[in-house]
Amino acid sequence: MRRLSSHESAALLAVLFVLPACLRTVPPADTGESEAMARIADWEDRRSLGEGQLIAWAQGQKGAAVRTRALRALARIQDPGTLDVVLSSLLASEPTVRDEAAFAAGELALSWEPLPDEAKARLTEGLRAAEATEADPGVRRTLLESLSKLATPGAVERLTERLGEAREGVAGRAALALGVAGRRGASLAEVPLERVGPLMAPGQPPETRYGATYLLVYLRRPAALEHLQRCASDADPEVRALCAKGFAEVGRPEAVAPLGKLLEDPVARVSAEAARSLARLSAGCSGPCPALDALLALKRHAATVAAGDSSAGHALLAVAQQGLPPFGRPVLEALRRSIREAPRGASAVALDDLAWLDCRLSAAMDRQTGALAEVLRCGGERVPEARRLALGLREVAQTQGQGGAPEAVAWLRYPDARVRLAALEAVGARPVPEALEAVRALIAGEDRVVAGAAAATAGKLKATQALPEVRALAARVPQEPGELAEPVAGALVALEGKEAEPMLRTWLGHPHDNLRRVAAEALTGLTGQPVRSSRVELPSGAYRPSAAPPGAKLTFRTRKGDFTVALDAEQAPLTSGNLYSLARKGYFRDVTFHRVVPDFVAQGGDPRGDGEGGPGYSIRCEMTRRPYRRGVIGMALAGKDTGGSQFFFTHTPQPHLDGRYTSFGEVTAGMEVVDALIEGDVILEVRAEP
């Protein structure tokens, strides 16, 4: 049994106060374990504390198994008022309970509505005290992960200390945790680089090398270049991909040569990351640009795509998504020529891939000028006009310093909602007054997603004339919070200022968690004082999908082949059950993968095809202990408890997503098909078994 030193016991107990009145426990009911588990699942889904019963069970009044499950529920509910219970459970005698408490602490740290500073301080001290004496390797690993989620100076300090830890695997896990904390915005200025290099040695385990390389990327120091040059030849492709990413972070011209070699890496996701980094480095050129010259090697990739290897197109896609400075236009033109000159006789699938890549590169050229031109005639008629226009307008919206976007106004009346949405993005980024009439009409339109975006655009235009339409739309928000909350709140603040406060305060008591979060954030900015919402229990009639059956799996059929996903019906029964049920109804037939980011994710499940759609309801998040390894399926979100039908597959490990988005399964066959996906690839069918 684990024992605490008197010093560490005092440190941990110092952060535990008497439970507030709202969390006073009640005597445990005489309930069997299976019934208790069912009650916990119901309370969790309704975001309820069971009138104190959930707290009582999380304190151990019904045994370790029930206590562990109750702590998982608290992790998912994310009520700051339960912090005392979570911290006290770090002292439990059972490792399984301590492990779950450590996970719950990390989930509190990741709350969508950020914790108050006082709670962060207490959480930091509690985690540090528990980690200092924890003997169980699994629990200690979870504590390190939770410190990374917290990312406070105190958490970074402890993780930095663990870089010198002699116990097997600890230093590598601490390095990864530090990298994740850095990615979340924590300062890593005090992390000594000399401790990182030895962890990247070839003799270290792959997990340790990966963690050290991940940290190296987010240290963002020019002095890291020497280590990056060594890890670029690592045996693990995930390490090589991270190295490629790190070269762009150090921003040194010496990075071009190793990145040029990584462009030829046999693993497509490594090549794609190298291409993205070269594109990023090119932005810093002020004369001859070796980074741009290196990218010309990608001309060979078009022929590889034509031969049937769609994954080779990810490097071209990465360059197009990243974009090049105006003086890089000849490179984009050369890459487009290589697509047009690709060998004839390619399959229809390959020709469609090449056509879309041509449009992607065309849109990158239009981003350089701030006007649609190349995208209007790209793709050789294989890409529909609406897709081309939506793509081009989104890219033009990213143009800097080009004045207004008057040409986008005409597209605000286009029949396809995807184009109208992209046109609003362009007008919002570069406002012009002549857009006002069309924007007001869209706020009053039937498409909720477009109406919300139009309201946000009116706010950016400072168009007080649109207040009647915005107010009318705001009245609909409590009934339709999913698509409307964030853009309408922004519009109200921009157009009404302090006068928006009364309506926003009514949202603080709404059952939809994300609406409460949006209101609290808007009011905090409006008043200059911290405003927090309170937890609200969901009504008993809220949508709750049936759980997926044990052994449930989905087979995705595409023109590039099939791949199979084993659903995690044990840890995420409702999330798995939701996707399982939609698949059985044929919901995903002819739905596309609308977003593919090389070396990151492939995302689909949106019937609109623009990333803004869903099934018309939302489900609760079920954070699991499944890490985001390569090939994991996760639920796409716009905030807490906003899941619906959109999902994503990870191309590579993404530890910064752990505990933030519900992970609920893993690809078990056909991962090469996931690697080959390009934006616009169609799901022919999803078969659910059994």
Image (cartoon, grey):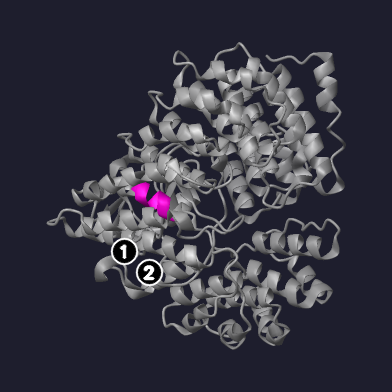
Q: Nearer the viewer, mark 2 or mark 1?
A: 2
Identify which residue is drawn at 60% across, 88% down. 437
Identify which residue is drawn at 38% across, 23% down. 235
Residue 99, image x, y percentages? 62, 28
- The answer to which of marks 2 and 1 sits earlier in the sequence is 2
Q: Can residue 543 be seen in the rendering of this structure?
A: yes
Name the residue nearer the viewer: 619 or 181: 181
- Residue pushed farthest front? 287
Identify which residue is drawn at 64% across, 27% down. 144
Name the residue nearer the viewer: 468 or 684: 468
Instruction: Magenta stretch: give its range.
Output: 314-320
Name the residue nearer the viewer: 344 or 201: 344
> Can you say which quadrant of the picture contains the N terminus?
top right
Say which element carries label 1. loop
Tell how many labels: 2
Dominant SS in magenta: helix
Q: CA distance from mark 2 to mark 1?
A: 28 Å
Residue 359, image x, y percentages? 35, 63
> Tag on residue 398?
none
The residue that disc 2 covers is 375
Residue 213, image x, y percentages? 52, 28
**Quadrant of the rendered structure where residue 435 is?**
bottom right
The residue that disc 1 covers is 589
Q: Amino acid at mark 1?
A: Arg
Q: Amino acid at mark 2?
A: Val
**Quadrant of the rendered structure where residue 162 is?**
top right
The answer to whether marks 2 and 1 mark residues whose Cβ atoms lie closer than 8 Å is no
Q: Is residue 143 left or right of residue 609?
A: right
Say which element carries label 2. helix
- Residue pushed farthest left? 345
